[in-house]
Each structure stands twice: as structure tokens, then as C-alpha cells.
Image: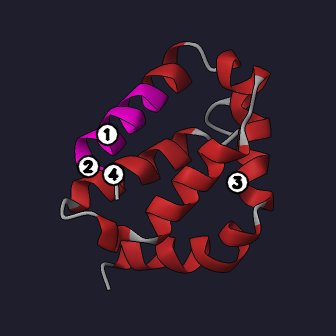
Amino acid sequence: MLPEFYVHDIADFLLFVIQHNPSVLEEQPTKDLSIFLIVFICAPHYFNNPYLVARLVEVLFMLNPSIQPYTQSLYENIEGNPLAAQFLAPALMKFYTGN
């Protein structure tokens, strides 16, 4: 299990890159990054800090091509991942409803 500050730093860095130089994510979209986001959004019990999951959901939101067109391939990697198909929608519903 990662220390929470690692995940927080990664989320902050991703938000910075998405806002200031999103073409970097388009050049080399990796499955590792999409799996990282999916796993930690879908398994919030790994963290004591609920703000951290909210930060990862914010990263996922910012990756949406309607918000940032340069991130389309990374967003498609997330959408096409079998883990996301099975677990992401229920995890997001749980996050937004607070159940």
C-alpha cells in the first residue's frame, strides 16, 4: 500500500499537467496510469483521507475530452478497461451519493 502523500502528489502533478500541458499525456498514454486511477477510485478503503479519493475523481473529470480535448486517448484507455467497466460506475455512484 502506498503512503497517501505519494498518491496525493501524483494527483496534483496530473492535474497540473492536464491544465498546463495536456499534449504530454496524449503522446504516450499508458495503461498503468489508467489502471492506477481506476483501482484507487474503486477501492477508497486504501485511504484514511476521503479528500484523496475526491482528488482522484477530479483527475478523472479533468481527463474527460469534453473538458480537455488533448486527453482523449488516455480517457479512452480508462473507458475501455475491463476493471472500469465492472467497478468504476458503482464506485463513482457510491462516491457521489456518500453511501
Give the mark nearest the N terminus, 1 or 3: 1
Q: Disc 1 vs disc 4: Cβ atoms closer than 8 Å?
A: yes
Q: Residue at x 24, y 54 (%)?
A: 51
Number of residues whose C-alpha sits closer than 10 Å to that of mark 4, classed few (under 14), some (14–19) or many (20 or more): few
* Relative vertical location of residue 12 with respect to residue 1 in this rendering, above or below: above
Which residue has dot 1 on it? 6
Name the residue at 76% across, 70% down: 82
Q: Are marks 1 and 2 in contact (CB under 8 Å)?
A: yes
Report the disc number at residue 2: 4
- The CA span between labels 1 and 3 is 21 Å
- 54 or 47: nearer the eye? 47
Residue 11 inside the magenta-drawn segment: yes
Name the spot of residue 56 as percent of width and height, x first. 42, 50
Task: Please report the residue visible at 61 percent of the width from the left and 36 percent of the height from the top.
Answer: 67
The residue tagged with tag 3: helix, strand or loop? helix
- Residue type (three-letter) at the residue carrying disc 1: Tyr
Name the mark on residue 3. 2
The residue sitting at the top extreme is: 21
The span from disc 3 to disc 2 (Cα, nearest Å) is: 24 Å
| Label 4 close to label 2 by CB (< 8 Å) | yes
Q: Amino acid at mark 3?
A: Ile
The amino acid sitting under disc 4 is: Leu
Image spot of residue 10 (x, y percent) = 40, 35
Count residues near mark 1 (Cα–Cα under 10 Å), then give few for <14, some for 14-19, many for 20+: few
Quadrant (top left/top right/bottom left/bottom right) for the N terminus:
bottom left
User: Element under label 1?
Assistant: helix
Name the N-terminal-most of marks 3 and 2.
2
Q: Which residue is mark 3?
A: 78
Quarter occupied by residue 12: top left
Report the span colored magenta: 2-15
Q: Nearer the viewer, mark 3 or mark 2?
A: 2
